[in-house]
Image: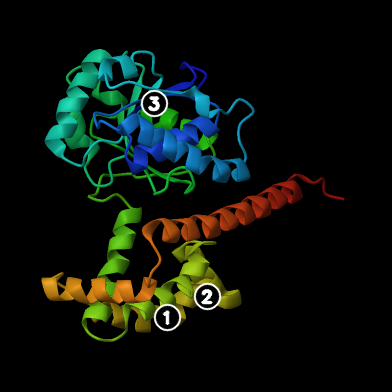
Amino acid sequence: MSHSKPIRRVAIIGTGVIGASWAALFLAKGLDVVATDVAPDAEAALKRFIAAAWPALQRLGLAPDASQNRVSFTANLADAIKDADLVQENGPERIEFKKTLYRQLDELLHPSVIIASSSSGLTMSDIQSACEKHPERCVIAHPFNPPHLVPLVEIVGGAKTSKDTIDRVAEFYTSLGKRTVRLNKEVPGHVANRLQAALAREVYHLVADGVVSVADVDTALCWGPGLRWGIMGQVLLNHLGGGQGGIEHFFQQFTGPMTAWWKVLGSPELTPDVQKKLIDGLHAEIGSRSIDELASERDEVLLGLLELRNKVEKSSQLKSAAPVA
């Protein structure tokens, strides 16, 4: 981004779960953060979240100038964004709310300041339609929860988003250690959430149809394909699934059975009865464990996986950089 001012100060709009997690990550990377939210207890809740997240971020590695003290808070939107180099917006998933907000941001911000939305389903074309001055600097930068740990960021431009904005924002998140994917076109739900939705549909169908319990379908996922998905994506795993013949052999062997299964995949309706079945099964699975206990368990295993992946990646880089004898 040699043609642009370096991003050193980020404004966070909305400090719920996603916004607070973004704030923790930016602070861990040595950036200055100014946060704003209209909730009466937002500042205290934000600081509690950052303090709780800090040990995990320390394990993953802090920037030399990282500090929890580099965050400030104001309830005034104009004050929060005044000197920002980038705005990370995490407002409610309501299109009229987004349009009103982006109209304000477009009026207040310097044209060079990127406005990145964490929206999980709305399209940037709809959101940026409210911007009369500089819609080209508006982009979707959708993280995966929790953003301070999960590296994925989906980058999607709207009809009026410039290529320069896409390139700049991708480079920024990559510099923070994030893994970015760029969508070539807008689709509702982007990519990762659509993949989750497709899997959830079959999970709910199997439980609703009495094929399997909630606990067993969760076990089937997290102790089977889920372990592999934490290492490689579906297409790469298909390549390995083909043995020495690779993906070509995989398609020769499994196209018939796989497409036959597609024809009988379920399309459940989430009726009150189906929801109750899922809810009851979930509570039977978790027993007395609280939300916080489950989140802590998730994050501890996730940290271990991230540390292992980082170790393997560094080892691979060293091997590839080694001179050939």
Find the distance from the CA under tag 3 to the CA under tag 2. 39 Å
Tell me the amino acid under the disc marked 3: Asp
- Can residue 267 be seen in this snapshot? no
Pointer 2 with pointer 1, Cβ within 8 A: yes
Which amino acid type corresponds to the residue marked 2 in the rendered image? Gly
Residue at 16%, 40% in the rendered image: 94
What percent of the width, then of the height, locates residue 257?
36, 84
Measure how far apart labels 2 and 1 are at the Cα level.
10 Å
Q: Which residue is mark 3?
A: 164
The image shows residue 130 at horizontal and vertical percentages of 15, 26
Q: Report which residue position mark 1 lands on.
A: 254
Q: Amino acid at mark 1?
A: Phe
Residue shown at 12% from the left, 71% from the top: 272
Task: Give SS at disc 2.
Answer: helix
Q: Earlier in the sequence, mark 2 or mark 1?
A: 2
- Residue 13 x %, y %: 30, 29
Q: Which residue is mark 2?
A: 241
Residue closest to the far right: 325
**Residue 38 falls in which quadrant of the image?**
top left
- Residue at the spot 49% in from the left edge and 43% down from the top edge: 52
The mark nearer the N terminus, 1 or 3, is: 3
Choose top left, top right, bottom left or bottom right for residue 105.
Answer: top left
What is the secondary structure assignment of the residue under circle 1? helix
Q: Left of 146 or right of it: where is 230?
A: right
Looking at the picture, does residue 322 appear above or below residue 239? above
Badge 3 element: helix
Which of the two discs, 3 and 2, labels the residue nearer the N terminus? Answer: 3
- Towards the viewer: 126 or 95: 95
> In this rendering, would 102 be left or right of 310?
left
Around disc 3, counting alpha carbons within 10 Å, would you say few (fewer than 14), some (14 to 19), or many (20 or more)?
few
